[in-house]
Amino acid sequence: MKKTPLALVKERFESKAKLVEAVSALATEELWLDRVNSVKGLARISNEKLLRLHELLTALKKDFGSRAKLIAASLELEKRTKDTGYKARLESYPTPRLWDHYSSVSRAAKRAAKKAAAQPTAAKPAAKAKTSRSKKAQAKVKATKAA
């Protein structure tokens, strides 16, 4: 049976306060756009969202190191490295949305590579000349060939 978010928080961090501290430590300027309500803060966010955010930020820090590198990797996979408007739009995305975007783009790139590898590169045979179906049309073709 799946554990509840509260049970996971107590198992991994002992308390929600320690989870909030861990997320706050990971949420630096290079990984995070600060859009949290300053009055409420991270303490008011649900345990499930905090756990997902902690997992996401640790994976992002381990794999890429910063949001800029994640954006560059997404642009590289989509072959749109020179598209400054698209890059600016990606920079405005929050980090979880960027991570989801990167994961979907990487899956699509893997599928495209697998599909390209599976298709043989042999040339297609030349198409046969279409034969006419009616007797009248067949007679015309024979007459033009004989002449």
Image: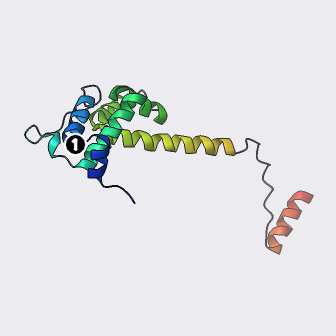
Residue at 35% in and 33% down: 58
Q: Is residue 104 left or right of residue 115?
A: left
* Residue nearer the viewer, 98 or 4: 4
Seen from the viewer's position, the closer of residues 85 and 119 is 119
Q: Nearer the viewer, residue 61 or 141?
A: 61
> Is 62 drawn above or below residue 42 in the view shown?
above
Color scheme of the displayed model: rainbow
Q: Quadrant of residue 22?
A: top left
Residue at 22% over, 32% down: 24
Q: Amino acid at mark 1?
A: Ser
Q: Residue at x 73, y 44 (%)?
A: 120
- Tell which residue pokes out farthest to the bottom in this image: 135
Left/right placement of residue 14 relative to residue 69 reads left
Residue 134 quadrant: bottom right
Residue 25: quarter of image: top left
Q: Nearer the viewer, residue 43 or 75?
A: 43
| Quarter of the image that includes the C terminus | bottom right
Residue 85 visible in the picture: yes
Q: Residue 6 in the image: state x and y as whole percent.
A: 26, 51
Q: Give the class, few, some or many, for how many residues have Cα within 10 Å of label 1's Cα (few <14, many ≥20).
A: some
Report the side of 63 relative to 136 (left or right): left
| Residue 63 place in picture, x, y as percent | 43, 30
SS category of the residue bearing label 1: loop
Up the image or down, 22 lies above or below 10; here it is above
Q: Residue at x 40, y 60 (%)?
A: 1
Question: Quick one: which residue is furthest to the right in this view?
Answer: 146
Residue 147: in sight, yes or no?
Answer: no
Residue at the disc numbered 1: 15
Give the x, y percent position of residue 82.
Answer: 41, 26
| Position of residue 140 measured from the top left corner of the image (x, y, whole percent) | 83, 66
